[in-house]
Amino acid sequence: MAPQTPKPVADFSLETEARLAGLWPVAGVDEVGRGPLCGPVTAAAVILDPANIPQGIGDSKTLSAAKREMLAGAIMASARWSVAHASVAEIDRLNILNASHLAMERAVAGLGLAPGFVPGFVLVDGNRLPRSLPGPAAAVVKGDAKSLSIAAASILAKVVRDHLMVDLAQQHPGYGWERNAGYPTQDHLAALLNLGVTPQHRRSFKPVHNILYQEHSISR
């Protein structure tokens, strides 16, 4: 049996390289919420303090909900951070990729414009860069598994959006958003058929669009 390739472990090497090149501070940026059928897409930007990086930061998808909550609190207490969203209307108008980039741009802008808080360099999870970042940046494929700053951003974005979906679930009960965060799970799809489409659903997404089309066809 061939040995398994070890999974990459996020570290601070990309940030250190940027700092040695005179690009400082470094912000890590990530988003969450591209796949759900409803709710906003959420992005976070984080500038970690090299002398005070919380232990245990990693890709948010590999962490338990309790671990993410604990780390989010530690990151908020020790780092410069910002969280921003792009709305359902913006997702439907721009498409999900462009809306994700808009949320990222807003998160970076939210770090503040005071000297020392304008990122000298931005590390963005993924293979494409948003167009309107305030300076030099690099796209890092699977960046949440490579860069501690991106991983920290992935944790904040996930925790904030999950909390938002719990709040929205109270306004629109029956869809299970407090459990599925708006993703197209079996219970969510069944509720869409039984309860219909809410204002929080993304009409440009195929399952939602199909239901609306069927309703329109029946009503004619």
Image: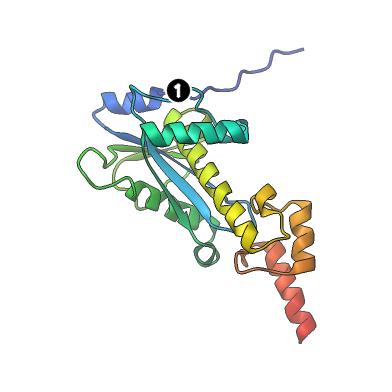
**Quarter of the figure with residue 210:** bottom right
Q: Residue 174, percent across and down?
A: 73, 60
Q: Is residue 38 visible?
A: no
Q: Residue 37, percent across and down?
A: 65, 58
Which residue is found at the position 61% from the left and 18% from the top?
6
Foreground residue, 128 or 197?
A: 197
Say what amino acid the circle numbered 1 marks.
Asp
* Quadrant location, the C terminus: bottom right
* Quadrant location, the N terminus: top right
Residue furthest toward the bottom?
220
Foreground residue, 188 or 123?
A: 188
Q: Is residue 39 above or below residue 54?
A: below
Q: Residue 87, percent across and down?
A: 50, 61
Per the image, the residue denoted by label 1 is 11
Which residue is found at the position 49% from the left and 64% from the top?
90
Q: Secondary structure at mark 1?
A: loop
